[in-house]
Image: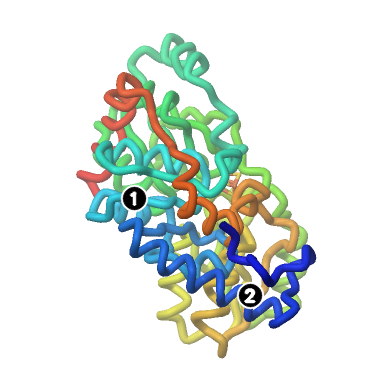
Amino acid sequence: MSPFNGSANGNGHSPTGSPLVVAEMVKEKIAILKREREAVILAHNYQEGAIQDVADFVGDSLGLARKAKATDAKIILFCGVHFMAETAAMLCPNKTVLMPDLAAGCSLADMIIPEQVRAWRVRHPDGVVVCYINTSAVVKAECDYCVTSTNGVKVLEHIPAEKEILFVPDYYLGSFLKAKTRRKIHLWKGYCPAHAAILPEQVDRLREEHPEAEFLMHPECGCTTKQMDLADQILSTEGMVQHVARSPAREFIIATETGLLNRLRTQHPDKTFYPASEHATCHHMQRNTIEKVFMSLVKLQHVVTVDPQVAKQAIVPIQRMLEIV
Ligand code: SF4
């Protein structure tokens, strides 16, 4: 079954309609399948606009985890990357969790493995291990608390002040939390390649060119440490969406993965958004396409599961986070 049956000619153009018509047809078929399958589509803010259009909820990691936990749908089609779908699978053990493309991983999450967490703990036996949600389930199973870019400060406030913290895997989010909380935090040296593409010199140039623009920065950015004092706001993707809606500013420089600009431009056609770098793109997020979303619902593929023994341990830091915020 293909959404293009009888119409596609191999280059995405339909003999009976424009690519836009075909895209609308795919979206309609997805809506029908979604009802038939009793499925819900959850999409990350970095997903392409067409996927966001068919999603029941678009948000950041924290919002998506909460929606997954709350839904009564039988199937969760998770349009994001693998660690996000794993989190949904652990929060909803009785539901089927699907991904459009299993190869959509996370380069940042891949920068630490369980053996490294265990070895780090040996060197800091009294340390509390805090992981960013951008970690695999097997790594989360070795950790004490989980955080997202939205709630890191609040979660850390729940850890006794005398405890030293081992933070994995994102060096820049960890640096941001260290500066905000003034805690003793040891930092793993992982980073997101998409956010590392945002360079301080580019940001400086854009700020000169657009002096009226507000500068919103994600804490994963490689330039966080240098630009922290300059940013009007350091925010998660969802925090940026909410800030833009509230702000009287007409122009914004957005320092995060460029996919977020789809949502901002759709919601605020009267405002202007400049990406801090056109190169801040995540090839993992871009693996998901509207066609793969459609095929996921047709074939009920690709199922994401977590080993029950791993899930039993990995759910602990996630639940601790969700109880705090
Ligand atoms: S943007 Fe970076 S942190 Fe987010 S999924 Fe892609 S590689 Fe991972």
State whether residue 77 appears in this view: yes
Q: Identify the mark nearer the N-term, 2 or 1.
A: 2
- On the rendered image, what quadrant is the N terminus found in? bottom right
Mark 2 vs 1: CB contact within 8 A: no
* Label ID, residue 266: none
Q: Is residue 205 left or right of residue 297?
A: right
Helix, strand or loop under label 2:
helix
Question: What's the residue at 33%, 28% (across, down)?
Answer: 314
Residue 9 at x, y = what percent?
Answer: 77, 67
Identify the coloring. rainbow
Q: Residues within 10 Å of mark 2 (few under 14, many from 20)?
A: some
When the figure is inspected, residue 126 is found, relative to residue 65, above or below; the finding is above
**Image position of 53 with respect to 315: above or below:** below
Check disc 1 and report its element: helix, strand or loop: strand
* Closest to the observer, 211 or 66: 66
* Residue sitting farthest toward the bottom: 270
Q: What's under tag 1, amino acid-wise?
A: Ile
Question: What residue sits right under mark 2 in the picture?
Answer: 22
Residue occupying image coordinates x 50% and y 67%: 52
Residue that mark 1 sits on = 75
- Give residue 11's position: percent from left, percent from top: 79, 66
The amino acid on which the numbered mark 2 sits, given as a three-letter code, is Val
Q: Residue 81: x and y, percent?
A: 52, 45
Q: Is residue 211 left or right of residue 97?
A: right
Which residue is rendered at x = 54% and y = 29% of the image?
Answer: 188
For the residues labelled 2 and 1, the Cα–Cα distance comes to 26 Å
Q: Residue pushed farthest front? A: 6
Front residue of 214/114: it is: 114
Q: Nearer the viewer, residue 229 or 267?
A: 267
